[in-house]
């Protein structure tokens, strides 16, 4: 964390390196944008007919509906990480909500009844997030181990409700999520864009400033009169809210429920957020970076399956590529220092 | 005046986290006696106590490296410990193959493997500035992936009889050999933390990296050393673990990963770094193992076990895992 404060220079010479450094500091997502472009170009090159009529739209639809749960979780995680916390319970909350919806949504009931269930799940997400936030922010427990403990409560509940994978979400619901497109752009992309637009508005208003202040330096934020505990609890509630959204999209995607559906997503979403330039110490990061991060992770998986690699090598290659991606700015810096 | 001094000297009655954890362990153990299928005579009680201590010693061994990494601060955490344990278990299992003379060479080989993985972790974290959480998580993937490539899911081997004798059987007076091993290990770890230059520097970088650097600590070097040692210790515990289970598996280490972090936290080590002890981790490991054993003895369904485990963990953290508030 070396930061040099410079006095504004008197001569206004345009220094490219200076500008680039400042640009990077302000826009933490630059690296993820670069990797995103590289992986996406590689992916499209491996698709033989990507630019034929309608193929691109189909690729967008099939990929983004699969990635949306992790993207949403990564977005929720970003809020928590911006305030300097960590939410290891978000994935098991997805499992819990996935299970609840799988057993209770049927085509026998009136549509409004199903809507009530979905709204109830969103409410539960807020409550679960509040529980996490209360324990970490209000009680002052260490976030990593506390949310890990609460994740056991949520995944245990999920297992209690539905020991074996089961579920029959009516096809008319899931197809709305799976195949709706407007002008060739799938519903899931509209959802992501909507969230990013709302965030762009909130970021520069009071809540956004407070959030970054709390993550940057808690004491200073406290002494300026920011209600630190409230902000911190609110981030966990936002994460819980996004967990419920992720669960809804996952349930619509698979049409069934499983008590372990979200278990893998937690660490993936954290990796996505960090890949997107969000700092685990808090105070710096962006939502768009986390979205890029999640897309990169999805694309790398796609690339590996497109390359028809021996399946024993997949985990090794996947993990190595992720480490290389995380290491790339550091490697560049190392070489620069040697000059 | 003298009254004032006296009243300020009258300290609030507080227990250090390790002692609290130990008392808690005792309480939990006594409580387990009241279960329908708990112990009912002194003999079985002692037996059960040894059994639990033996089981918790594995957890505590794996948590040893984790303690070092967490004390080093900078969001330090080692999520690759589980994968390193697995690789150690498989290497030991395959190369010893029931041969006593192979024990020492394989032990060195295993520790070298663990240290190498730890070294990569440390280099990535210290010099490439990758956050420890994702660096070690990624390395866990690389190690597990490499194991898959090499073994293709098939492995074969046997543990040497001498390992079984020392680790799994009773050594003298009905006391398991593992217990002696653990006590020696604990003393060595405490000496490393409290009485060596490295230990002092470790706590120094955990409290504040900048002040540590300004007072002459080579922070990057200490970080790399810490992750390497943590890798070596995880590998060592894998070596010991396979002596006890006498069986191997491709995911055998993963189940110990998060419990080991919980043991460190319950033992009073701050997850933000700079404060902690191995004694605390030992006590924490006993508490975690007791909870797990209790839940298993009560024969609750898996779902309830998970929930109770989570709730007990939360209760423990509330009891004494609280960080200092902002208000001074």
Image: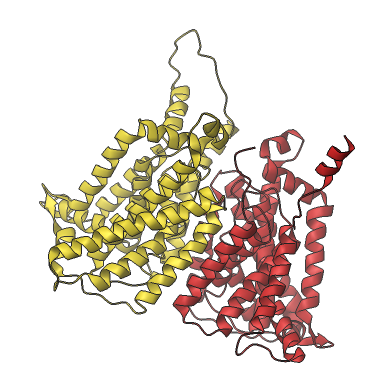
The structure residue drawn at horizontal position 70% and vertical position 52%, both measured from the top left corner, is: B225
User: Looking at the rendering, which quadrant does residue B51 occupy?
Assistant: bottom right
The vertical placement of A271 against B189, above or below, is: above
Chain for colour red = B
The vertical placement of A118 against B50, above or below, is: above
Q: How is the image coloured?
A: by chain
Residue extending farthest to the right is B2
* In the foreground, B319 or A238: B319
User: Quick check: can you spot residue B57?
Assistant: no
* In the foreground, B17 or B208: B17
The structure residue drawn at horizontal position 75% and vertical position 40%, both measured from the top left corner, is: B217
**Number of numbered callouts drawn:** 0
Task: Where is residue B72? Give x, y as percent.
Answer: 67, 49
Horizontal relation, residue A250 to residue B188: left or right: left
The image quadrant where one finds the N terminus of chain B is top right
Residue extending farthest to the top is A10
The image quadrant where one finds the C terminus of chain B is top right
Task: Where is residue B163? Give x, y as percent.
Answer: 73, 83
The structure residue drawn at horizontal position 22% and vertical position 52%, both measured from the top left corner, is: A188
Chain A as rendered: colour: yellow
């Amino acid at each position: 964390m070396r930061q040099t404060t410079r006095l504004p220079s008197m001569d206004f010479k345009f220094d490219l390196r200076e500008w680039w450094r400042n640009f990077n500091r302000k826009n933490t997502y630059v690296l993820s944008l670069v990797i995103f472009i590289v992986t996406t170009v590689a992916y499209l090159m491996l698709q033989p007919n990507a630019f034929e009529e309608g193929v691109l739209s189909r690729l967008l639809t099939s990929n983004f509906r699969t990635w949306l749960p992790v993207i949403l979780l990564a977005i929720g995680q970003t809020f928590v990480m911006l305030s300097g916390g960590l939410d290891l319970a978000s994935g098991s909350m997805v499992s819990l909500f996935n299970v609840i919806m799988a057993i209770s949504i049927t085509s026998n009931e009136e549509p409004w009844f199903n809507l009530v269930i979905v709204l109830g799940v969103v409410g539960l997400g807020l409550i679960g997030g509040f529980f996490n936030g209360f324990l970490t922010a209000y009680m002052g427990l260490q976030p990593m181990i506390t949310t890990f403990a609460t994740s056991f409560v949520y995944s245990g509940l999920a297992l209690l409700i539905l020991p074996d994978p089961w579920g029959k979400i009516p096809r008319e619901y899931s197809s709305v999520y799976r195949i709706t497109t407007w002008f060739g752009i799938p519903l899931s992309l509209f959802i992501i864009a909507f969230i990013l637009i709302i965030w762009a508005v909130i970021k520069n208003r009071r809540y956004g400033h407070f959030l970054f202040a709390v993550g940057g330096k808690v004491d200073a934020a406290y002494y300026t009169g920011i209600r630190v505990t409230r902000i911190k609890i609110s981030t966990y509630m936002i994460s819980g809210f996004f967990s419920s959204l992720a669960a809804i999209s996952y349930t619509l995607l698979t049409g069934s429920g499983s008590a372990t559906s979200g278990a893998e997503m937690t660490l993936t979403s954290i990796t996505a957020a960090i890949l997107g330039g969000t700092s685990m110490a808090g105070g710096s990061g962006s939502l768009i970076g986390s979205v890029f991060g999640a897309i990169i992770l999805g694309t790398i998986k796609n690339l590996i399956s497109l390359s028809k690699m021996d399946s024993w090598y997949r985990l090794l290659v996947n993990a190595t590529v992720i480490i290389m991606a995380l290491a790339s700015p550091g490697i560049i810096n190392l070489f620069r220092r040697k000059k | 005046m003298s009254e004032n001094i006296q009243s300020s000297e009258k300290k609030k009655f507080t227990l250090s986290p390790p002692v609290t954890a130990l008392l808690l362990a005792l309480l939990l153990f006594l409580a387990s006696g009241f279960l329908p299928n708990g112990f009912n005579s002194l003999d079985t009680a002692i037996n059960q106590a040894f059994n639990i201590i033996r089981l918790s010693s594995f957890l505590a061994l794996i948590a040893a490296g984790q303690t070092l990494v967490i004390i080093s601060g900078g969001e330090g955490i080692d999520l690759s410990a589980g994968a390193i344990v697995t690789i150690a278990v498989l290497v030991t299992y395959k190369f010893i193959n029931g041969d006593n003379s192979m024990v020492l060479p394989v032990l060195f080989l295993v520790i070298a493997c663990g240290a190498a993985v730890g070294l990569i972790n440390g280099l990535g974290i210290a010099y490439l500035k990758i956050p420890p959480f994702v660096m070690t998580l990624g390395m866990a993937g690389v190690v597990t992936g490499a194991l898959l490539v090499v073994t293709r899911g098939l492995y074969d081997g046997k543990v040497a009889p001498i390992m079984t004798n020392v680790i799994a059987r009773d050594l003298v007076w009905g006391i398991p050999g593992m217990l002696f091993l653990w006590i020696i290990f604990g003393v060595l770890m405490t000496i490393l933390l409290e009485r060596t230059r490295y230990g002092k520097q470790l706590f120094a970088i955990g409290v504040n990296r900048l002040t540590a650097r300004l007072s002459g600590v080579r922070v990057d070097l200490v970080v790399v050393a810490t992750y390497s040692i943590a890798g070596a210790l995880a590998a060592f515990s894998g070596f010991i673990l396979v002596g006890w289970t006498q069986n191997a598996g491709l995911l055998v280490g993963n189940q110990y990963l998060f419990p080991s972090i919980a043991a460190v936290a319950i033992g009073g080590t701050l997850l933000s770094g700079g404060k902690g002890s191995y004694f605390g981790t030992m006590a924490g490991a006993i508490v975690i193992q007791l909870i797990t054993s209790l839940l298993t003895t009560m024969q609750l369904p898996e779902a309830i076990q998970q929930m109770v485990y989570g709730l007990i963990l939360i209760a423990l953290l509330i009891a004494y895992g609280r960080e200092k508030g902002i208000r001074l």
